[in-house]
Image (cartoon, rainbow, N blue to C red):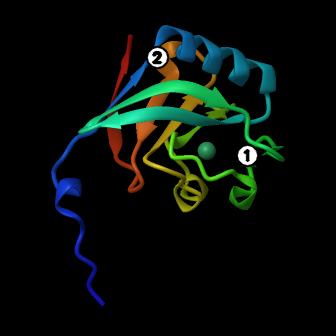
Amino acid sequence: MFFRRKKEEIGVRRRIVLTKQITDSIITYAKSFHPNEGILILQGKKDKNLIKVTGLVIPPFSTHGPYYSGFPMYELPFDLSYIGTIHSHPGGSNKPSLEDLNHFFGLVSLIICHPYEAQNIAAFDRNGNNMELETE
Ligand SMILES: [Zn+2]
């Protein structure tokens, strides 16, 4: 079986924009869970190829461990403003694990790794490709 991708997914680089306030909240949250992983749902708006993160939601019934953080997706209310997740990596790498890609939710996955500074945040799409990230 061959699945054709939708046209707009081919060769289009999406950009993610984070406000200073969102970035600061992510940093504080990640630090508070260290040495475990923390996870948050990203709320935002998509305008063509620009995705702007406008809010963070603490997922219900989330689990946190040193190598895994997650939440049961069936507990989530259906909300079109949910555009992805951010989770922390207590280790020094902000690359997505296979587990991360298997649990991909929404349009974008952000990962922040130790020591949890703004430059430790990376953005990925469903295929594990790097997305351009801007901080306002
Ligand atoms: Zn991960």
Query: Is 102 on the left-hand or right-hand side of 46?
Result: right
Q: Is mark 1 within 8 Å of ligand 1?
A: yes
Q: Is residue 83 visible?
A: yes
Whichever of labels 1 and 2 marks the residue nearer the N terminus, that label is 1
| Mark 1 nearby-residue class (10 Å; few <14, some 14–19, many ≥20) | some
Residue at 59%, 11% (x, y): give it.
24
Which element carries disc 1, helix, strand or loop? loop
Say above or below: 104 vs 92: below
Residue at 46%, 14% (x, y): give it.
19
Which element carries disc 2, helix, strand or loop? helix
Query: To which quarter of the image does residue 89 belong?
Result: top right
Query: Is 14 on the left-hand or right-hand side of 52?
Result: left
Residue at 47%, 27% (x, y): give it.
53
Q: Which residue is mark 1?
A: 67
Q: Which quarter of the figure is the C terminus placed in?
A: top left
**Horizontal and vertical percent position of residue 107:** 43, 47
Q: 75 or 111: which is nearer to us? A: 75
Q: Amino acid at mark 1?
A: Tyr
**Horizontal and vertical percent position of residue 81:** 51, 40
Query: To which quarter of the image does residue 1 belong?
Result: bottom left
Disc number for residue 119: 2
Determine the quadrant in which ligand 1 lies. top right
Q: Amino acid at mark 2?
A: Gln
Say above or below: 76 vs 90: below
